[in-house]
Image: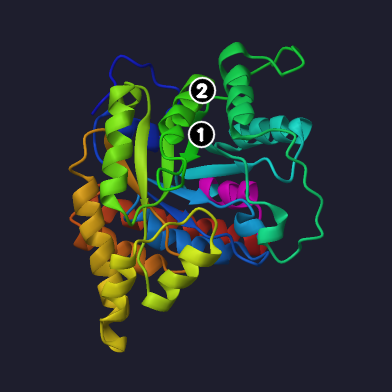
Amino acid sequence: MAHPEQPLRTNSRLERVLRSGRFAVTAELNAPDSANPEDVYRNALVLAEVCDAINATDGSGANCHMSSLGCCALLVRAGYEPVLQVGCRDRNRIAIQGDLLGAAALGVRNVLCLTGDDVTAGDQPQAKRVFDFDSIQLLQTARIMRDDGVFLSGRKLTTPPRLFLGAAENPFAPPYDFRPLRLAKKADAGADFIQTQYCFDVPRLAQFMQRVRDLGLHERLYILVGVGPLRSDKAAEFMRTKVPGVWIPDTVVDRLAKTPAKQKAEEGKRICIEIIEQVRQIEGVHGIHLMAYRQEETVAEIVHRAGLLPRQRGERNRQRAASAVTGAQQAERRI
């Protein structure tokens, strides 16, 4: 569903795709444990051919990787469409506002506002928590900077950041009745788009979306449903017991458990594609957000098999993207 009455916030590709009513595809680029830009470019080249925008994760799982801002700067340099993820765990309001200005100056147009996983989820649990903001306060701050042209202090900005603001939501975590109400708070705070947690339970998503439509939120927000492939029943069991917020029904785990070992990864892809086909039929869903840790080629395969291509204008765009990456790599070597 297009929202033609709403003005363009930015000139980002993601916003233009969503405003036009096309079904959007975003995916996560998992930030490398590396200072080598080629580690970003290599994975981005695969994703850019099949996605409208690429999320750069921000210390996901409370583990340290290359910063989201660093990844996004490299993606912009190579001609890609990044989504900056900003978490509240590690920064106070001064640092966050500075990062938003810096990101906009670098050409980043899409920002996903997150509270962030607690440090106990990661490999450095002794790290100090900040949490000066939560995700709703972060959204409000970014909206004030964009729309009112001021810092939270009231000091005027010379040039406000033009940002397409996003947030996360989890329809699959109790209390279920509260989730649509929290989504409404994020809409009020300034969210333009939403990316959800992994969906492995389509009936639960359908119930959530019914309430979303009852509240009219599908006309205020662009909702992208999180999906991803499972490599095996063991991987599914790990995710639903160890990854906060992930819900995987027994029926999915049992289906993978009954699949022969050599076919489990393929069955996981099939399940993901089936879920994509089902969520596309739900009114108010505007796209998908594909998450597959270190599986960029699998993401591309799923987008192909789910019939979500073409996303760009053919081979010429692919060649231009590859050329941009090559130029950026050469520039890095000269430095």
Tell me what residue is drawn at x 32 percent, y 33 percent: 18
> In x, y percent, where is residue 285?
28, 38
First-in-chain label (2 vs 1): 1
In the image, residue 144 above or below residue 238: above
Please identify, in this view, whether the residue under mark 2 or under mark 1 is nearer the observer. 2
Tell me what residue is drawn at x 48 percent, y 34 percent: 166
In the image, residue 295 above or below residue 121: below
Q: Amino acid at mark 2?
A: Gly
Tell me what residue is drawn at x 71 percent, y 59 percent: 120
Say which residue label 2 marks: 190
Q: Tell me which colouring the rendered structure shows.
A: rainbow
Say which residue label 1 marks: 109
Left or right of residue 206, residue 67 in this image = right
Query: Is residue 74 shown in magenta?
Result: yes
Q: Amino acid at mark 1?
A: Arg
First to last magenta residue range: 66-76
Numbered circles on residues, count: 2
Query: Can residue 64 be seen in this snapshot?
Result: no
Q: Give whichever of 301, 270 is nearer the camera.
A: 270
